[in-house]
Image: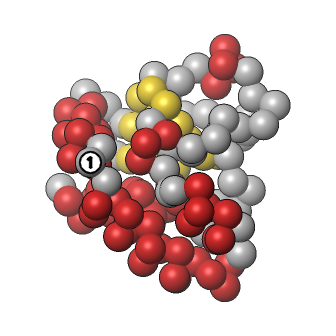
Amino acid sequence: MSEIKLVRIYDHEQPAGYRILVDRMWPRGMSKIKAALDEWDKEIAPSNELRKWFNHEDEKFPEFKKKYEQELNQNDFTPVFVKTVKEKLQKGNILFLYGAKNKEHNQAVVLKEYLENKF
């Protein structure tokens, strides 16, 4: 069965799958060729205000998660994104690519859980 996988865009080991960058900002130092994206859905990423507030501080993650889920619920792009992900999962794995160093506390983690609760 196909699944959503979280992959740091800078990791050398990159599994196969449909590649979606879920960051609002382009990853520093990453070339578009090397990124080999299928999509860059910056519209689904946390707002600049929320991103700056969170600042990848672990202790803020529970509150960040709540606020980001609220943004997703109000985001006009979310239904389109959910539909696209559902369709792509029929064909194979999807990779949510992100640039954050912290692999446990980032927006891709929240987004994956959010989507899995929608399916």
Depicted 59 relative to depicted 11: above or below: below
- Residue 56 visible in the snapshot: no
Q: Hey, which residue is sitting farthest right in the picture?
A: 29
Count numbered badges in the picture.
1
Closer to us: 25 or 89: 25
- Where does residue 49 sit, x and y in percent of width and height? 59, 63
Q: For the point 28% across and 61% down, which residue is it?
A: 74
Q: Hey, which residue is sitting farthest top in the picture?
A: 33
Colour scheme employed for the rendering of this structure: secondary structure
Quarter the N terminus occupies: top left
Closer to us: 109 or 52: 52
Q: Is residue 45 left or right of residue 88?
A: right
Q: For the point 39% across and 57% down, which residue is it?
A: 112
Depicted 107 relative to depicted 9: above or below: below
Q: Hey, which residue is sitting farthest front in the picture?
A: 49
Q: Is residue 110 left or right of residue 77?
A: right
Q: Quadrant of residue 60?
A: bottom right
- Where does residue 37 sit, x and y in percent of width and height? 53, 24
- Where does residue 76 sit, x and y in percent of width and height? 26, 48
> Can you identify the residue that label 1 sits on?
76
Depicted 81 relative to depicted 111: above or below: above
Secondary structure under badge 1? loop
Q: For the point 58% across and 77% down, which residue is it?
A: 61
Q: For the point 34% across and 59% down, which residue is it?
A: 72
Amino acid type at circle 1 is Asp
- Residue 62 visible in the snapshot: yes
**Disc 1: CA contacts within 10 A as few (<14), some (14-19) or many (>=20):** few
Quarter the C terminus occupies: bottom left
Q: Is residue 22 left or right of residue 94?
A: right
- Where does residue 92 sit, x and y in percent of width and height? 31, 31
